[in-house]
Image: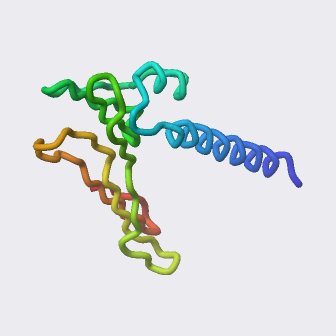
Amino acid sequence: MTKGLKLVFGFSLFLLAACATSGGKFGKIYPGMTSDQVAQTMNKGPTKVNQFSEGYAAWYFGEDQCLLMQQDKVVAKNVTEEKAEIEAWGLGGVTRSQKAECIPPGYKSTAKVERTIETPFGTVKH
C-alpha cells in the first residue's frame, strides 16, 4: 500500500469513528433525562437553544440533532433525515435532506428541506 493510500485509508477510518462516536452519544439520550444528564452524556452542552412558552426549549447539537426539553427534561428528539430521491446510475442524483427540528405541540414547523443535486460537472444545493 502506498503512503498516500495509507493516509487516505487512515483518515477515512478516523472520520468513520468520529461519526459513529457522536451519533452514539446522541443515541443514548432518552425521554425523561435531565439537562445535566444530557450534558454529561454528550460531553458538552447544546450549540443553540430556542426558548418557547410553557417551559419548552429546543436544544440543538449542530444542525443535525435536537432535543425538545420541557421543565428541564427531554420529551422528544429528532435528527436530520436524508433520502435519495433519484439516482442516475453513476452519473449523479438528487438527495433530499430535512434538517432536524424540535418544536412544542401547537407550533408551526419551519423545518428546512435541502436538495443536493450531484452531476458529473459538480454539486448544487437548493
Residue 11 vs residue 121, the one in the foreground: 11
30 left or right of 106 in image: right
Quadrant of res 101 = top left
Q: Nearer the viewer, residue 55 or 113?
A: 55
Image: 27 above or below 59: below
Residue 1, quarter of picture: bottom right
| Residue ID at (20%, 24%) | 55
Residue 120 sits above or below residue 66 on the image:
below
At x 10%, y 43%, the residue is 106
Image coords of residue 13 (percent x, y): 72, 46
Q: Residue at x 42, y 68 (%)?
A: 119
Residue 4 location, x and y as percent? 79, 47
Residue 48, position as x, y percentages in the image: 32, 25
* Furthest residue toward front: 32
Q: Residue furthest right?
A: 1
Quarter of the image that includes the C terminus: bottom left
State the colouring used for the structure image.
Answer: rainbow
How many marks overall? 0
Q: Is residue 115 left or right of residue 34?
A: left
Locate residue 34 relative to residue 27 in the image: left or right: left
Q: What residue is at 52 percent from the left and 76 percent from the top? A: 90
